[in-house]
Image: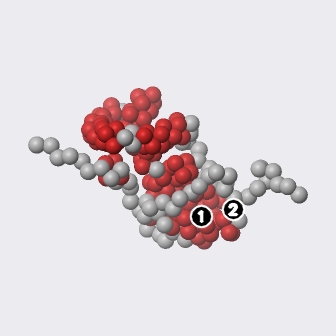
Amino acid sequence: MSLTKQSRRGRPRGKEYPQPDNLTKGFLIAQFGKIGASEEMVVVFQCPYRTIDQLQKSRVLRQVLNVVERDRKQWDAEISQIIGQKIVAGDHHFFRRMADAVEAVSQTKFEHVKSPRYHALDYKLSCYAQGIHFTQKGLRPYLGSKGVSIDSSTLSKIYRWASGAKLYLLPLIPSALGVKPKRSG
């Protein structure tokens, strides 16, 4: 008896979920798979131009736009240095991976993420905020409340995967890519 793609269990073919070292990367990996762990995804995801575009479309308060505009100026200075160094180094793989990251982000709607890994990290963050322990016993009902039914073996794997994510955000772009910012003056 052969199984069809729809009836197979486990992760989709070609989808890899590397172990995240922090929550932000974990959320990106849960949403985008292996490309979510790349340095290029860090650059694409932290791009303030995406936020500015979304804020302008939703007509959010002017104060929020001012804060994001300030972040954009810092990001412009940092990213121009990174791009320049990658060009000088002839790192064409960086630009190919960057294109893959941009394509993945542009094809994804962020409103409804149904990945059990994403919800596991969401639960971990919620536990941290409430000052309670992140446990496998608490994870199952949380996933159930999100409409995710999961067997014990998969639950155990997802719990171990999410447990490895530390509770801190991504570093600044240059340090994430191994580029030291130049000091001016």
Would residue 15 be found to the left or right of residue 98 on screen? right
- Residue 12 position, x and y percent, is 67, 52
Q: Are marks 2 and 1 in contact (CB under 8 Å)?
A: yes
**Disc 2 secondary structure class:** loop
User: How is the structure coloured here?
Assistant: secondary structure
| Residue 137 visible in the shown view | yes
Residue occupying the far right of the picture: 1
Question: Quarter holding the C terminus?
Answer: top left
Would residue 170 be found to the left or right of residue 142 on screen? left
Q: Which tag, 2 or 1, sits closer to the chain's start?
A: 2
Q: Residues within 10 Å of mark 2 (few under 14, many from 20)?
A: some
- Image point 59% across, 64% down: which residue? 158
- Image point 66% across, 65% down: which residue? 154
- Where residue 150 is drawn, which disc sits there? 2
**Vertical position of residue 88 compared to residue 58: above or below:** below
- Image point 56% across, 60% down: which residue? 120
- Image point 37% across, 38% down: which residue? 48
Would residue 185 be found to the left or right of residue 45 on screen? left
- Where residue 172 is drawn, which disc sits there? none
* Residue on which disc 1 sits: 158
